[in-house]
Amino acid sequence: MRNLLIFACFLLLACNRGEEGSGVGERRTTPSGSRTDERVRELCVGEGANVQAVDVNNDGTPDIRHVLANGQRRCTEIDMNFDGRVDVVRFFEADGQTILREEHDFDFDGRFDQIAVYENGQLTHKELDTNFNDRIDTWLWCQEGRVSRAERDRRNSGRVDTWEVYDRGVLTEARYDDDNDGEPEKFEIFRDGRLVEIRYDTDRDGNPDRAEEVVAEQAGQAEAPLFCTLDATPPAERPADPPPPTPEPAAEVSETESAEISNEEAMGEAIGGAQ
C-alpha cells in the first residue's frame, strides 16, 4: 500500500522555494533535484499595465497576480490563505488558456512541494518533494492521467535509487539500488498489482541470477492504480477549465479568481486532512 500512503498527501503538491513572508510577484528558485526548464519562470515577470493584482480580502496586500502578454494571461500567482506567500503558480501557453506548468505549496510553509509539467495541455510528468526538505525526491511520468513510470530517491541522498514501471497506473516492476552504486540489484515483480517474485543480481553483472517466489499469503494487498492527479475522472469527462481573466484591471474579485481560490482551498483542505 506504499503508493496510497505516499500520494494521499503528495499527489497534488508542487516544488519551489520563496523567501519568508514573500508575497505575489517575488522571485523564487527551484528546489534541488528538479529537472524542469527554469526559463518557464520568465513568463511570470511583468510590471505596469501587464500585471493585474487583486486584493481578495481587502487588507491592502495583493492575493492574486496575473501577468499578461499581448492581452493573454501568461502566469497566475495565488496566495490561498492570505499569509503573504504564494501557494499556487500556474504558467500558460501563448493562448492564455492552455496550461504549461503548475506549482503548489499545500502545507503553506513558503516552499513549493510539487511541479507539474504539461505538453499541449496534457499532464506529462510531476516532481515531488515528499519530505518537505526543498529537494525533489520523486519523479513521475504520466500517460492519460495515470503513472507510467517513476523514479525515487528513497534515502534522500541526491541520487535515484528506485525505478518503477507501471501499466496504466498499476505497478508491474520495481528495481532497487540498495548498495548505492547507481545500479539496481534487487527486482520486485508484480502481477495485477500484487508482489509475486523477487529477483536478485548477486554477481552485480546487471542481470538477475537468483529468484524467490512470493506466496500469496505473504504478498500483502495489491497496489492500487496510481493516478497523476487526485481526480481519477478520465480527462474527457472533466468539466472545462474556467476562462482566463480579461486584460482590463479588475477592481473587484472576478468569478474566475473566486473559483480559483475556492478550488485551491478545497484541495488544500483535502491534503491537510490526509496528513
Image (tube, rainbow, N blue to C red):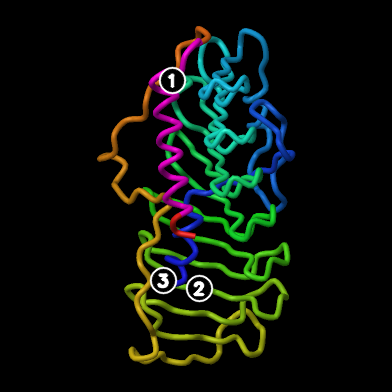
Asked if 134 appears above or below 243 in the picture, the reply is below
The boundaries of the magenta stretch are 250-272
Foreground disc of the pair 1, 3: 1
User: Is residue 132 rendered magenta in the image?
Assistant: no
Q: Which residue is mark 3?
A: 172
Which label sits on residue 174? Answer: 2
Q: Quadrant of residue 63?
A: top right
Label 2 is placed on what type of residue? Answer: Ala
User: Is residue 258 rendered magenta in the image?
Assistant: yes
- Could you say where residue 156 lies in the image, as x and y percent from the top left? 69, 66
Q: Please report the residue visible at 62 percent of the width from the left and 60 percent of the height from the top.
A: 131
Specify which label sits upstream in the sequence, 1 or 2: 2
The residues bearing labels 3 and 2 have C-alpha atoms spaced at a distance of: 7 Å
How many numbered discs?
A: 3
Q: Which residue is mark 1?
A: 244
Q: Please report the residue visible at 62 percent of the width from the left and 69 percent of the height from the top.
A: 154
Q: Are marks 1 and 2 in contact (CB under 8 Å)?
A: no
